[in-house]
Amino acid sequence: MQQLFFVKKGKLEWREVPAPRISSGNDALVRPFAVAKCDLDDAFLFNNVDLKIRIGNALGLIDPSYKSTFGNLLKGPFPFGHECVAQVIETGSHVSDVKIGDIVSVPFQISCGFCDNCRRGYTATCNTVSSISTYGFGKHLEFGGAMSDVIKVPYADHMLTKIPDSIDPIKLASLSDNISDAYRHIGGLEQNPDQSILIISGKAKSVGIYALILAKSLGAREVDFVDNNEERLELAQNLNATITYSSFSQLNKKYDLVIDASSTQKGLNAAFKSVRNYGTVSSSGIYIQKTAISLIDLYAKGVKFKIGLANAKTDAPKVLELINAHHIDFGLATTRLDTWNNAIDAFLTDTTKVIVTREKV
């Protein structure tokens, strides 16, 4: 079968690989038909991350925990893509919750559903599989990537989230990761929308936009947005952000909740500076470089700081409920919609959210 591989900076290529097969009664085979480029994909598509990390290590700039935690997660070659919606084409003998023909979201993290962490909703840290087991990265090649003719899904009844017929599945290609990542920042708005929010956009480019869509849909009192990227500022303005800023230096207010999607020290500093006393800073950042945080300052201000991997499987059904209740359109974040056959050119475009599609079976 055909599978798209990330080879090195600026290079994707189709390769012929063996098709996966059902090996357990709990497996399913699915055929992706809408695949989105994740924000993290841009880190290695447009940068020689491996070289930068090696140089950074030599200079003492890289967090020493990075290698032990993530290993060669971003080093090619590896199968590309980890955000998708797909059609079920085959199921194992023990699979009962999904059936052939179902349209499903496939979470990017592999999780079993029955270990202690999974039962608590921490599907990003499943105890049954190896740490950081995902589709579409370099550390665990056996899981493949979403840009494949077929991918195998273990623990299918747990892993797969069915997409209702009433929702356009293409708009939910990023439910596998970036949309769920955005949701975890603003889930509290469902109980208390009377909050002021600042979104610090940046390297997690679509997470910031998805968070804006969610916050506005859930009725947040105020949602400001800062980024130096013209495309994302225009998106934020079109999505009715209360105020948009093009520079951290323009920020001059305090907020109940600050969402950091910058993945930079400057963005994180701006987040802590902009949060009110006893407010919350919630981050999607992956801070590979050593990062300085003044815990004394956070202590004095009573700031709650939340950071960590998204639990994509846990949060995807919650997002679907919000879509039905609030008529949320995540398609508003898509800046390039293209065809499967044109995937290489599409994914190598530096824009906020790329989705490629092909016909369902």
Image: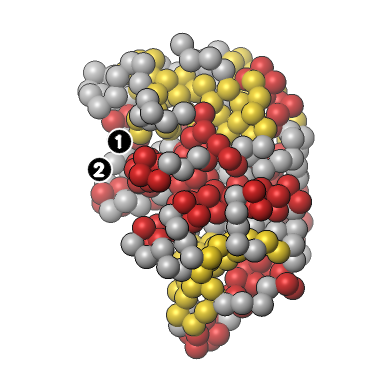
Image spot of residue 242 (x, y percent)? 60, 62
Which residue is found at the position 53% from the left and 86% from the top?
Answer: 296
Q: From this viewpoint, is residue 94 visible? A: yes
Image spot of residue 181 (x, y percent)? 49, 50
Which residue is found at the position 52% from the left and 33% from the top?
Answer: 171
Q: From this viewpoint, is residue 177 visible? A: no
Circle 2 packing at 10 Å, graded few (<14), some (14-19), many (20+), is: some
Which residue is found at the position 28% from the left and 30% from the top?
Answer: 157
Q: How many marks?
A: 2
- The amino acid sitting under disc 2 is Phe
Circle 1 packing at 10 Å, graded few (<14), some (14-19), many (20+), is: some
In this picture, residue 101 sits left or right of residue 253: left
- The amino acid sitting under disc 1 is His
Which residue is found at the position 45% from the left and 80% from the top?
Answer: 278
First in sequence, mark 1 or 2: give its number. 2
Front position in the image: 72 or 168: 168
Which quadrant holds residue 106? top left
Give above or below for 329 relative to 194: above
**Label pair 1/2, CB-CB below 8 angstroms:** yes
Label 2: which secondary element = loop
Give above or below for 85 relative to 358: below
In this picture, residue 80 sits left or right of residue 257: right
Q: Which residue is mark 1?
A: 158
Image spot of residue 277 (x, y percent)? 49, 82
Front position in the image: 311 or 239: 239
Label 1: which secondary element = helix
Q: CA distance from mark 1 to mark 2?
A: 9 Å
Q: Which residue is mark 2?
A: 114
